[in-house]
């Protein structure tokens, strides 16, 4: 109870809010000025209760009640949808009016500090309008789906499948086109305001040169709830321009589909990417919306803090009709050279692309790689052109699709019409990826820190769409699992959840009780930093991809894992890490060199104490004159010497054991519980005998 009271004082919320019924939650989240246009959830719920009682008592027929319910749902849908369309046009007109103001002479704004503050306040006003409208649509969508499921449960008549389809056809649910227009124009307004304030045109701004060698690249991924997606987008648009993938279509997000290949029998690429093994690769074929070519890509992981190399992504283009023949080896180097001739490849890019072509084709055939997992999502990108210091992307509507695990004739991936509904995993969050390139010792921008450390983002170390999809769809084939797969929100998505083992208590609380139902951040406070990948593109990259420097890296097979050989007779099975479905949970973190230095200092402290005890023992033996002259002193000296020798061996064993645990990142307790106790007892006993 004391812990709960402290948590309530810290967060300002009660635990009751996380268990609030949806009707009360909806009432608390309504905007007062739009209150009349929300779904009347409480009224419909009360109506269902009354009608269900009447049907059970036989005073009213089920058919009459169903007809009335359909009319009520229809009228509520029309009310909510009409208000959404009117408000959307109203917000769009507000943004268009502000754009006209900004298109006028900006000199007066640059001279007046008060005018510049006024522009910022108006941007905040427009941002509130957009985010409120998005939250309005999300809240009503959830409300309609819940009341339909409530109807099926109370009335005993199944109507939710077709009724939910009707709900999803409404504009306030299928609102991507509306919010794309709003976000694109809002981003243009933000860009013009930044030009007024800084006096610098972002379109001609570029950062590079020799100083880029001293920059540190880091990539961190976060999860964002669907209700907070628009808040995150508008917050980023205030500071970074929105990248438009297709200027002909008013869409701020582009559809990206990637088919990942692996060996279904060994899942070696999956395990290498999960364990972050040095030299681990990922092979995929990526398609972009409205693109006529397929990108064959290979990602190679490098531990930069060990090898000095950075992870690299290499790719080249293929025609869709040539992908299957490339995988099977029928598409030869001569055919690829003809393709490069048609694309007018530069000489250097031609040589590198041909080298990558040979390596990828050999790896696919020698490792027997097959289509394993396909990911599909809509990507929204933010970046100042030519400036790689801050790059942010947000992937929404993420789906992981199970592939056929075999190469079918002339099919390098499973067609959409052959995909079964049970083979599609709809990821419940949007994935925010923040890429920073800052100088050593320089903190990231304050607005980035405000976003990533705020309540809308949940950091997930080393998250991978490919790894998550395999862990969900192919759990029996996976040799190990990522740490987030055991969190409660994914249990319902796993195959045959009734066979899941009971999780330990420390892993069963993925939701913060005081956080209003939002996921709680991981317990560790240090942000793990992943070195950004250098993109080596031998083609003209699709719009929205940042091209970086660096050359081709020789691919290498993952090294074999090291084994703990010292004192192999000791059973260390009880010291291994956490498990899920009988397989280990892999939680990779960056190990700093200072960790090993601290371990060595601890070892030297133990050795110093042992040397001191051994010196005392040798002195007693020397001054005793031998066992015949002073047997008591001789025995005490031998006891001290024996104690010192034993604890020297104990210190060496503890040092090697802890080094192994740190190197393999096992989740265990590093405390030496019994060693200090035995040392104390031994020294006290030897001292008493010497008195």
Image (cartoon, rainbow, N blue to C red):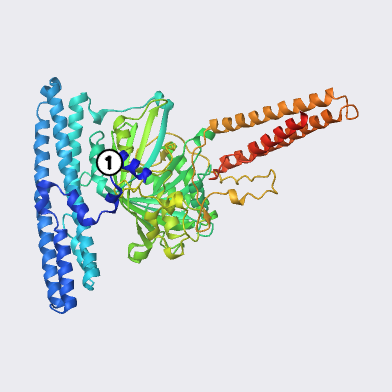
Q: Nearer the viewer, residue 536 or 465?
A: 465
Q: Position of residue 58 (x, y in %)?
A: 15, 79
> Relative to 524, is 139 above or below?
below
Residue at image point 22% right, 47% down: 251
Q: Residue at x 64, y 46 (%)?
A: 563
For image coordinates 68% across by 36% down, the residue present is 681
The residue carrying mark 1 is: 12
42 relative position to 299: left or right: left
Residue 27 in percent (x, y) is at 17, 52
Q: Which quarter of the figure has residue 470?
A: bottom left
Residue shown at 15% from the left, 22% from the top: 113
In the current view of this chain or complex, which residue is farthest to the right?
A: 628
Above or below, comparing residue 410 to residue 104 in the picture:
below
Disc 1 residue crowd, few under 14, some 14–19, many 20+, Cα 10 Å: few
Q: Specify the farthest residue to the front.
A: 691
Does 25 sit left or right of 565 as displayed? left
Q: Quadrant of residue 173?
A: bottom left
- Residue 441 in view, yes or no: yes
> How far across and how far down the image is residue 534, in percent?
42, 37
Give the farthest residue toward the top. 111
User: Residue 498: horizontal and vertical position, in percent?
Assistant: 43, 65
Residue 291 visible in the snapshot? no
> Which of 307 and 45 lies nearest the eye of the viewer?
45
Q: Is residue 477 left or right of residue 128?
A: right
Label 1 element class: loop
């Amino acid at each position: 109870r004391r812990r709960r009271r402290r948590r309530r004082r810290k967060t300002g919320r009660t635990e009751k809010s996380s268990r609030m019924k949806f009707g009360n939650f909806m009432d608390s989240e309504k905007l007062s000025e739009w209150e009349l246009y929300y779904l009347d959830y409480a009224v419909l719920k009360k109506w269902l209760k009354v009608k269900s009682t009447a049907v059970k008592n036989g005073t009213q027929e089920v058919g009459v009640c169903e007809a009335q319910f359909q009319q009520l749902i229809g009228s509520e849908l029309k009310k909510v949808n009409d208000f959404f369309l009117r408000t959307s046009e109203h917000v769009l007109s507000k943004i268009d009016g502000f754009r006209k103001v900004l298109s006028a002479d900006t000199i007066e704004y640059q001279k007046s500090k008060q005018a510049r503050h006024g522009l910022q306040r108006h941007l905040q006003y427009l941002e509130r309008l957009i985010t409120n409208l998005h939250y309005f649509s999300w809240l009503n969508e959830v409300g309609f789906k819940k009341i339909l499921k409530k109807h099926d449960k109370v009335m005993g008549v199944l109507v939710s499948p077709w009724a939910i389809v009707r709900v999803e056809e409404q504009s306030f649910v299928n609102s991507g086109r509306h919010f794309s227009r709003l976000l694109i124009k809002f981003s243009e307004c933000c860009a013009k305001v930044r030009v007024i304030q800084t006096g610098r045109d972002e379109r001609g701004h570029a950062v590079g040169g020799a100083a880029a060698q001293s920059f540190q690249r880091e990539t961190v991924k976060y999860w964002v709830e669907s209700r907070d997606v628009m808040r995150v987008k508008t917050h980023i648009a205030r500071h970074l321009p929105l990248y438009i993938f297709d200027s002909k279509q008013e869409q701020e997000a582009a559809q990206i589909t990637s088919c990942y290949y692996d060996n279904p029998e060994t899942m070696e690429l999956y395990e290498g990417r999960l364990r972050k093994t040095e030299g681990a690769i990922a092979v995929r074929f990526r398609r972009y919306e409205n693109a006529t070519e397929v990108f064959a890509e290979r990602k190679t992981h490098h531990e930069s803090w060990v090898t000095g190399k950075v992870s690299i992504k290499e790719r080249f283009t293929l025609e869709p009709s040539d992908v299957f023949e490339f995988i099977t080896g029928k598409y030869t180097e001569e055919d690829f050279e003809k393709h490069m001739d048609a694309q007018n490849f530069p000489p250097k890019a031609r040589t590198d692309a041909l080298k990558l072509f040979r390596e990828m084709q050999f790896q696919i055939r020698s490792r027997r790689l097959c289509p394993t997992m396909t990911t599909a999502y809509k990507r929204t990108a933010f970046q100042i052109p030519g400036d790689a210091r801050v790059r942010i992307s947000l992937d929404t509507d993420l789906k992981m699709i199970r592939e056929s695990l075999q190469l079918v004739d002339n099919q390098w991936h499973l067609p959409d019409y052959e995909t079964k509904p049970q083979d599609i995993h709809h990821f419940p969050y949007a994935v925010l990826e923040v890429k920073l390139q800052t100088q050593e010792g320089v903190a990231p921008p304050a607005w980035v820190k405000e976003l990533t450390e705020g309540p809308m983002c949940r950091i997930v170390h080393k998250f991978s769409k490919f790894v998550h999809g395999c862990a969900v769809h192919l759990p029996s084939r996976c040799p190990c699992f990522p740490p987030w797969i055991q969190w409660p929100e994914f249990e319902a998505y796993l195959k045959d959840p009734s066979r899941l083992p009971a999780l330990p208590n420390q892993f069963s609380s993925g939701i913060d009780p005081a956080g209003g139902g939002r996921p709680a951040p991981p317990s560790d406070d240090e942000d793990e930093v992943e070195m950004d990948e250098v993109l080596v593109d031998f083609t003209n990259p699709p719009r929205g991809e940042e091209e970086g420097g660096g050359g081709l890296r020789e691919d290498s097979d993952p090294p074999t894992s090291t084994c703990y050989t010292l004192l192999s007779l000791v059973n260390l099975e009880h010291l291994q890490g956490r498990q899920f479905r009988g397989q280990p949970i892999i939680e990779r973190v960056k190990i700093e060199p200072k960790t090993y230095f601290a371990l060595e200092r601890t070892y030297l402290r133990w050795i110093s104490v042992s040397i001191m005890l051994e010196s005392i023992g040798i002195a007693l033996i020397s001054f005793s004159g031998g066992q015949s002259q002073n047997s008591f002193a001789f025995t005490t000296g031998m006891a001290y010497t024996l104690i010192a020798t034993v604890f020297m061996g104990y210190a060496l064993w503890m040092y090697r054991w802890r080094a192994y645990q740190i190197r393999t990142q096992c989740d265990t307790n590093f405390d030496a519980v019994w060693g200090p106790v035995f040392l104390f007892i031994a020294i006290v006993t030897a001292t008493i005998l010497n008195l």
